[in-house]
Image (cartoon, rainbow, N blue to C red):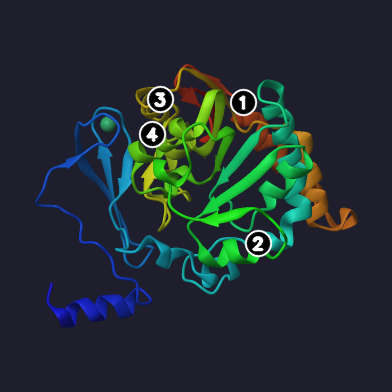
Amino acid sequence: MNPSSNSSEAAKTGGIDYEESGTNNEVRCPVCDSSMQPLYIIDRFSPALDIWKCSVCNLQQNRTVPHDLTTLYEEGYYTGQASFSYEDERNQEEANDMVWTARLRNIGKTNPPPGDFLDVGCSFGGFVASASRAGYRARGLDLSQFAVSEGKKHGRDLMCGAVEPSVFSPESFDVVTLIEVMEHLPDPALAARSLHSWLRPGGLAVIQTANFDGNQARKEGARYHYYLPGHLFYYSARNLKQLLSDAGFRRFKIYRPVDFPLAAKIRKMKRQSQPSRLDPSRILRTAGYHIKGKVALGNFALTSSMVLYAWK
Ligand SMILES: [Zn+2]
């Protein structure tokens, strides 16, 4: 690529400089080391997402990756100014606390407070604050300098950094959570090794990400809403378990659709809107999705929602 085409590409992508996909080189699967093949070009984004799939374990990879991942998570990502952005969680903390508290109750059944708790991809640290209130010594890690410095203003113990074993001493934590974060991490094996290193024996990793074995992802194909810039890997319950088991995790439990009850989700919706204005059809749709999410047999699941608990 010559310098002029490079700069026009950068202009088209809001100044972010992307890696070129290695179409000439063989792409190996980071979970099972088999060969990966091109699956989709998803052109509703600019630049288009270049999705590859492992022919053996079905792991999918988006190979449209910026040279510098931190460019994805600047202020605009959180405030809706970036072309691809995330909800500004700061306005939603009270509502989110309804499901965070319910999740912490479930975690506490096997790994109760007090204990050392780390939320990876903590953003502004709302879940860290909930975990502190539940009695854990809670910390957060995030790649975004912006989110970490905003969260610290509220007295939260957050730090900026990537997911690498050296970031924390071995056996520093009893619980490590990655809620809609695993899919953002650029090196799955390094991430799994980091979690295993940071946890004490018996420690719990909680990972929420989409299950691409689920019928929802299979049926919607390239239209599935989970394909997003910044989502670099797309897992299934099977290949995620394989990745973690190769890193040394020994015991697993899958929750479908999530690890908290429907009632917690409805409490969150009620907090988000004035209860009098909460549309009953929205509650029905949420309840329907939640119940559908429980339908699973072996590797078949009706929706693609899952939360994996993995113990060291
Ligand atoms: Zn594979």
Measured Cα–Cα span from mark 1 to mark 4: 30 Å
Residue at left 65%, top 31%? 259
What is the quadrant of residue 218 in the picture?
Answer: top left
Q: Nearer the viewer, mark 3 or mark 1?
A: 3
Report if the CB atoms under discs 3 and 2 are less than 8 Å apart: no
> Under tag 4, what secondary structure?
helix
**What is the x, y in percent for residue 227?**
42, 51
- Disc number for residue 294: 1
> Under tag 1, what secondary structure?
loop
Q: Does residue 284 appear anywhere in the picture? A: no
Q: What crowding class fits label 3: few (fewer than 14 Cα within 10 Å), some (14-19), or many (20 or more)?
A: some
Q: Does residue 294 appear anywhere in the picture? A: yes
Quadrant containing the N terminus is: bottom left
- First in sequence: mark 3 or mark 1? 3
> Label 4 belongs to which residue?
193
The kind of residue tagged 2 is Lys
Residue at left 35%, top 68%? 46
- First in sequence: mark 3 or mark 2? 2
Residue at left 53%, top 35%? 207
- First in sequence: mark 4 or mark 2? 2
> Under tag 2, what secondary structure?
helix
> Label 2 belongs to which residue?
152
The kind of residue tagged 1 is Lys
Asked if 71 appears above or below 105 in the picture, the reply is below
- First in sequence: mark 1 or mark 4? 4
